[in-house]
Image (cartoon, helix red, strand yellow):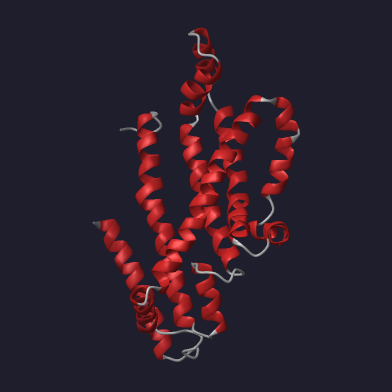
Amino acid sequence: MRRWTNRLLFFGGLLLLWEALCRAEVWPPYLLPAPGAVVASLGEGLRDGTIPVAIGASLTRLGIGFGAAILIGTATGILLAVSRVLKDTLGALVLGLQSLPSICWFPLALLWFGLSEKSIVFVVLMGSVLSIAITVEDGIRAIPPIYLRVARNLGAQGARFYAGVILPAALPAFVAGTKLGWSFAWRSLLAGELLFAAPGLGFLLTMGRELNDMARVMAVMVVVMAIGYSVDRLFFSPLERKLARAWGLVRA
């Protein structure tokens, strides 16, 4: 209760400050709309179906790109962890590419795939796959060597060794990497959609800017934040806590 009380007081204070700034006309309404105008714009977007359609389109692109990133990133991380040659060669390339902002991939995507859904999916993939690969590699390398020796002495080999020992032992790190990859994928998606003339949350932001409709822009921003917060609180945080208790990382 204390946590929720603190949150209500904090966000209530922010809303009051926001409303006070609007009433004081520190900035004109077309630059800083009042909270009521943002809520009205959000309600209008929900009623006419604009925002639900955009959410569906964005989440579809995210699901395809992020799903591919999980598969490719996990396989790459395992290879980097078990092969010294790949670690010294491909690993250096992965670390270098990780420093690139995801939007840097968009010009290449446009040249390779044109202004299409494939371009957005590619940007989402490249925005998250490298962080997942690095985290999976670090998680595997952090496994205590005695676990691996015991598993080999008990006869675990080949696919059984990786599926039954390596991946379960590195699962907390894998979930942490997936969470990090999700945040990068979400940002990459919106950055790509800002330049893509098709239904999506990023496109709604662009349309709001072009129409000088700041209430719509801020309403879409609220939706973006709500989706990101909901995914973290409803999926990743409970999964991380459950794994931490199951793996003995925290007291049950």
Query: Residue 144 appears at what percent x and percent y?
Result: 53, 22
Q: Residue at x 72, y 36 (%)?
A: 90
Indicate the quadrant where residue 252 lies: top left
In the picture, which quadrant includes the N terminus? bottom left
Q: Residue at x 43, y 62 (%)?
A: 56
- For the residue pair 17 and 84, the one nearer the viewer reads as 84
- For the residue pair 173 and 9, the one nearer the viewer reads as 173
Q: Residue at x 69, y 62 (%)?
A: 110
Query: Residue 47 appears at what percent x and percent y?
Result: 33, 76
Query: Residue 87 appears at what percent x and percent y?
Result: 70, 31
Query: Residue 20 appears at what percent x and percent y?
Result: 39, 85
Asked if residue 104 is positioned above or below residue 242 in the image, the reply reads below
Counting labels gives 0
Most extreme residue toward the left is: 1
Indicate the quadrant where residue 229 lies: bottom left
Indicate the quadrant where residue 85 lies: top right
- For the residue pair 86 and 99, the one nearer the viewer reads as 86
Q: Residue at x 41, y 80 (%)?
A: 18
- For the residue pair 8 and 101, the one nearer the viewer reads as 101
